[in-house]
Image (cartoon, grey):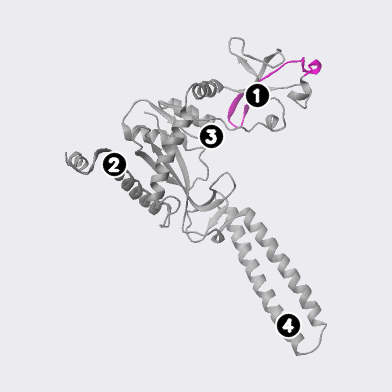
Amino acid sequence: MPLPPSGAKFKGVNSRDRNFTKGKLKRRVEQVEASIERYLASLEAADLQEGESAETKASRLRDKIAAMKSKLAELRQLEAAVLQAPNQQISLTDPDARAMAASMRGAGVVGYNVQAAVDTEHHLIVAHDVTNVVTDRTLLSPMARSAKEAMAVEKIDVLADRGYFSGEEVLACEAIGATPHVPKPLTSNAKAAGRFGKDDFVYLADQNAYRCLAGEILSYRYTRLEEGRTLQSYWTNKCGTCALLAKCTTSKERRVNRWEHEGIIEAMQKRLDAGNAMTVRRRTVEHTTSARSKRGWATRTSAKGLDRVKAEMSLCVLAYNIKRMIAILGVHPLIAAMRG
């Protein structure tokens, strides 16, 4: 049975003003230093004036400068603590909460990443988790494994959006009997610049080579290790005379790299092209999101600390599943099934 994992960023009790990252602290320190400079300039001008009003103004400015220097010292201490933190951010109200993007428009919350795996037939949440990992890229196989264990099945189809895409996670899913359906993000710099992307080159498995749009063969050259990944490089020496060179690369030749497990990614893309996995995923996720929203726990938690938030979400998931089972079976059949 297909399962679409989904991740939602839930706002915690920690406000954004009480969360500090390296970048945020840098900007805040610069603002406070600029304020101190302005107050010092104003104080210098006030000291040149005479009269009671001038002295009152100077006294007020000295108080502001002292307050700003105290704030600056506090920010410096926080800066040192942030640099020592594992992910270089600190939340003061809820130490486990993390700043994370909540939408593609860049809006963010300080809170938690709530994961849910939902079966496509009955729209029940079969597995869930709460984490403060800010992205979903490392969470596909853990959620697939949890769903498989909860449903006690040997094989499972996993449908997820492009935010979950990771070659390593796709490979990990295949290893545990979970067939992934995850679109690959469009991250090609060449495509963004209007040139041909890697997907415009056809891999010829029988030759271990690529064919470009001009019909030339890019032969295998060598294998290298890069950031723990084994990559094979391909190119041809005929790029210099190609009429399509300007549309292909800014270098003297176009090189294509291939991950050693690229075949798994290509097979997944063929599954996506041949089916309607993303339509099923959207339909399933939208159902549970709408139902959760009506029950008031769509985007916010009320507990502090990862363990407490996990407990809170477990209760919410239980309530959702009971409501869903009542809608499917009816109250009395459900009670009878629970008693049996």
In whole angstroms, how far apart are the C-alphas of marks 3 and 2? 31 Å
Label 4 – label 3 distance at C-alpha: 58 Å
| Upstream in sequence: badge 2 or badge 1 | 1
* Residue 216 placement (x, y as % from top left): 71, 12
- The front one of 60 and 76 is 60
Inspect this view and state whether residue 49 appears: yes
Asked if labels 3 and 4 touch by Cβ distance under 8 angstroms, the answer is no
Residue 82 located within the stretch drawn in magenta: no
Question: Tag 3: residue type?
Answer: Arg
Amino acid type shown at disc 2: Ala
Calculate the distance from the C-alpha at mark 3 to the C-alpha at mark 1: 18 Å
* Nearest to N terminus: mark 3 or mark 2: 3
Instruction: Specify few, some or many for label 3: CA neighbours under 10 Å numbering under 14, 14-19, or 20 or more.
Output: some
Q: Which residue is mark 2?
A: 327
The image quadrant where one finds the C terminus is top left
Tell me the tag on residue 198: 1
Q: Which residue is mark 4?
A: 57
Q: Where residue 232 appears, x then y in whole percent? A: 63, 21
Position of residue 101 relative to residue 54, above or below, is: above
**Picture residue at 76% right of the left edge, 85% below the top:** 54
Give the quarter of the image for residue 217.
top right
Does the CB distance between marks 3 and 1 fall below 8 Å?
Answer: no
SS at circle 4: helix
Q: Which residue is mark 3?
A: 162
Which percent across, then down, holds residue 314? 35, 48
Mark 2, other Cα within 10 Å: few <14 / some 14–19 / many ≥20: few
| 4 or 1: tag closer to the N-terminus | 4
Q: Secondary structure at mark 1?
A: helix
Mark nearer the N terminus (4 vs 3): 4
